[in-house]
Every structure is written in C-alpha cells, then in structure tokens.
Image: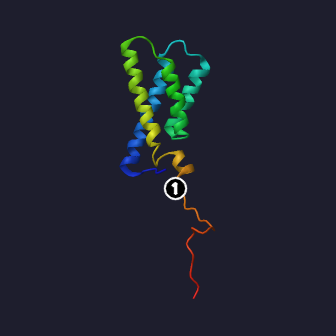
Amino acid sequence: MAYPGGIAGAAFLLMRMHAALIVGRLAFEVHGLDLPVRVLLALVGVAFLLGFLTRVAVAIAVVVLLATISNEVVVLLSRFGQVLALLALGLVGPGAYSVDARFFGRRVVYSSGASAPHKREP
C-alpha cells in the first residue's frame, strides 16, 4: 500500500479531519446514543485525527452512521453523503502523515530465496 506525501498527503490529512468532524458531530447531535457508543465515537475521532487503524475506524463509523438513519429525507441524504466520504477515506487510506504510514509503510524486504538478487563472485 502506498502512503502518498506532499500535497496528496495533506489532502488525506484533511479527509481524516473531516471524518473526525463527522463522528464528533454524530456523537453530540444524535439523541438516544448510549454513553459507551459516544465514547467509542470519540475514540474513532481521535483515531481519524492520528491516522491510526484508519480502515477499522471507517468500518466502525459507517456501522454507527447506518444505525442512526431515520425516515427523514434530510437525515437520510446527510448520512448517505457522510458514508460516501468515509468509504472514500477507507479506500484510499490515511496518507503519509499518519500513524498507519509509520507502522505499515513501505519496507524493503530481502529474501534469501531464489528471487533475491545474487552477487557474482569474480
């Protein structure tokens, strides 16, 4: 998986900030959410800000968003847009400026198997 930096990495950081705002707003505005769900959403928001286990955080946030859909058209459309934004973040990943990039970023792996480059001896 690639973790792009530069302007693209900054754009992914902005996407993660937007995702944190989505779950933060959800935690404070939806009536009837129990305290453990609100705490979970707060932790998911922090995970988005740090870029830590981003795809797991996306999955949790999408499940909670879908569970809070109501029959009102405005709420339905709003949730649909939020789910799409979170799914986009889940598909592209957190970007270079994240904990995930630090833990799971590109690595060079050397193998002692047949596919490893061999040095010729003179």
Q: Is residue 108 above or below residue 66?
A: below
Instruction: Depth check: give the residue in front, 42 or 114.
Output: 114
> Can you tell which quarter of the image residue 34 is in?
top right
**Residue drawn at point x = 52 percent, y = 52 percent:** 105
> Can you tell which quarter of the image residue 100 is in?
top right
Q: Residues within 10 Å of mark 1 (few under 14, many from 20)?
A: few
Q: Residue furthest right?
A: 112
Percent x, y of residue 81 = 38, 26
**For the residue marked with disc 1, what is the amino acid?**
Arg
Percent x, y of residue 5 = 42, 51
- Total tally of numbered discs in the picture: 1
Q: Residue furthest bottom?
A: 122
Percent x, y of residue 116 = 57, 69
Q: Quadrant of the C terminus?
A: bottom right
Label 1: state its secondary structure.
loop
Colour mapping: rainbow
Q: Which residue is mark 1?
A: 106
Percent x, y of residue 26 = 48, 21
**Residue drawn at point x = 44 percent, y = 32 percent:** 86
Q: Is residue 11 above or below residue 36?
A: below
Instruction: Depth check: give the residue in front, 116 or 2.
Output: 116
